[in-house]
Amino acid sequence: MHIVLDETALAAAGQGNVLASRLIHRAHAEPDWFLYAPACVLVEADRSRPGTAEHIAALPGVTVLDLDLPAALAVAQQETWAVAHARYAAQPTADRPDGAIIATTAPKRWQGQPVRTLDLTP
């Protein structure tokens, strides 16, 4: 299971959202669960809730995805960096042939986008 956290999911995790906490726990405890936090998402989450980026980056079950050149080119074509980086991270890759699911508390934002979502709204 490959899951990309958007900035709303990161904020929810910092505010005690049970569903977000369960995802983080599973990614730490289960070998076939992978959680990703794209760098641009971390920045946006930290802007709205200072300390979020450092907290999430310190969790052993979360992999921070760098803004490498292909990601930067994808982000440059979009209006918001956090959404663009999350969407880019959810696309299929050699390691994730089926892509990843985006965990969010704002699922309507992703309607019409070529991604699958996991609603973390309590």
Image: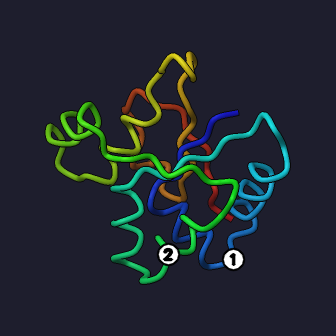
Q: Kindly identify the residue that appears in the image at 37 percent across and 32 percent down.
A: 112
Q: Quadrant of residue 69?
A: top left
In this rendering, position of residue 81 left or right of residue 94: left
Furthest residue toward bottom: 50
In this rendering, position of residue 82 left or right of residue 117: left
Cα gap from disc 2 to disc 1, whole angstroms: 12 Å
Element assignment for label 1: loop
In this rendering, position of residue 84 left or right of residue 11: left
Q: Is residue 64 above or below residue 15?
A: above
Amino acid type, residue under disc 2 in the picture: Thr
Q: Is residue 29 above or below residue 72?
A: below
Q: Kindly identify the residue that appears in the image at 53 percent across and 44 percent down.
A: 4
Give residue 53's position: percent from left, percent from top.
46, 70
Give residue 85's position: percent from left, percent from top.
34, 44
Q: Kindly identify the residue that appears in the image at 62 percent across and 61 percent down.
A: 121
Q: Quadrant of the N terminus?
A: top right
**2 and 1 marks in contact (CB < 8 Å):** no
Disc 2 vs disc 1: which is toward the camera? 2
Q: Kindly identify the residue that appears in the image at 58 percent across and 70 percent down.
A: 12
Q: Quadrant of the C terminus?
A: bottom right
**Few, some or many residues within 10 Å of mark 1 (<14, 14–19, 20+):** few
**Few, some or many residues within 10 Å of mark 2 (<14, 14–19, 20+):** many
Q: Which mark is residue 73?
A: none
Q: Nearer the viewer, residue 55 or 121?
A: 55
Give residue 76's position: percent from left, percent from top.
15, 41
Q: Is residue 93 above or below residue 6?
A: above
Q: Is residue 97 above or below residue 41?
A: above
Residue beneath disc 1: 16
Residue beneath disc 2: 52
